[in-house]
Amino acid sequence: MEKLPRPFEKYVPIIEDTLAEIFVDKDDNILEKSMAYSVLSKGKRIRPVLALTTYELCGGRDLKEISKCASGIELIHAYSLIHDDLPAMDNDDFRRGVPTNHKVFGEAIAILAGDSLQTLGIELIANHPEGSSFIRKRMRSLRQVLNAIGRKGMALGQAQDISKKDDEFDEKSLLEMHQLKTGKLLEASIVCGAIWANADSKTLKTLKTFAKPLGISFQLSDDILDEVSTIEKLGKTPGKDKRDNKKTLVSLWGLEKAKVNLENYLSLALRSLAPFGDKAQDLRDIARFIAKRDF
Ligand code: GRG
């Protein structure tokens, strides 16, 4: 895929500006340097782009203010990548085309950078949008994100991924692990954008129905890329899952069935957007990008 879809062209510059503002003092000390190193490296910014897209879809208009809480989600994602790359976890040398955080700053600082990105992300979501009339929105979005990343979300998914033996994973438990590890934060991004725009409960329900198959499409395309792509395109070492004998959706289904299932989950995600009609074109484009991306 050469050209990024419209929502990326529109929202990524806003997110990049906000991230640059957050790390304006990035040379102050080793912790800031290490945090900024990972956050400002070349990420796709899928989660904040999803949040800003649903925000505008649901009628939100203050993109600049919302870019702060949406960036909070990106910081939490960056934390998870730093910790995932550590020797005690996935032990990776490259991420986003550059050496992993611990390779540059050492393990101890990388752990602290991850910790601090998580708390800073939470702080941004707790504080934006600013103003006493938005307290309820801030609490609701914070609850979504906290539920997505902790012991009932991303951290649990990661724990299952690390501790379960491969023969303990069947299709159901593998999908559940991925839903926890990556699906829930994607879902929280989608839902938070709508909460910030004051969406009603019916709209939130439709968006959650979209988020589930989208999360599986995201993981499937990640697993397929790990099998077929190159380090130049991915910015990280491909083929690792196979080398480590890890059970993935591709090893479970085989490459061809995985591709067919990816199409099916993408169709499911696209169909779930029907209640929005033409207004959801940006979300459809993001879903197609997530499923068809080559990096
Ligand atoms: C450390 C608690 C904890 C959790 C780690 C996110 C995660 C959980 C692990 C990452 C391992 C991994 C490669 C999972 C596959 C899906 C994924 C999150 C890919 C990276 O996300 P992208 O493609 O990355 O959005 P960029 O770099 O574009 O932001």
Image: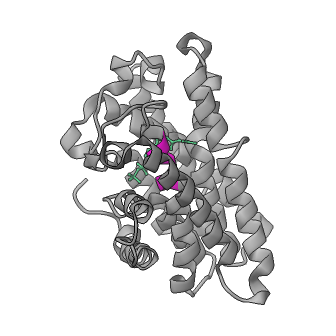
Please indicate whether residue 30 sits to the left or right of residue 47 in the image.
Answer: left
Q: Kindly report the secondary structure that dominates the magenta region of the rendered protein.
A: helix
Q: Taking the image as drawn, is residue 128 in sight?
A: yes
Q: Is residue 203 visible?
A: no
Q: Quadrant of residue 91?
A: top left
As drawn, the residue found furthest toward the top would be 167
Specify start and end residues of the magenta stretch as a single range.
77-83
Q: Is residue 159 left or right of residue 50?
A: right
Looking at the image, the residue that sits furthest to the left is: 232
For the rendered model, the colour scheme is one colour
Up/down of 84 relative to 166, above or below: below
Residue 51: image x %, image y %?
55, 67
| Above or below: residue 204 compared with residue 270 | below
Q: Residue at x 38, y 68 (%)?
A: 8
> Is 24 on the left-hand or right-hand side of 60?
left
Q: Position of residue 214 (x, y in %)?
A: 54, 48
Residue 186 belongs to the span the image colors magenta: no
Residue for point 64% across, 64% down: 122
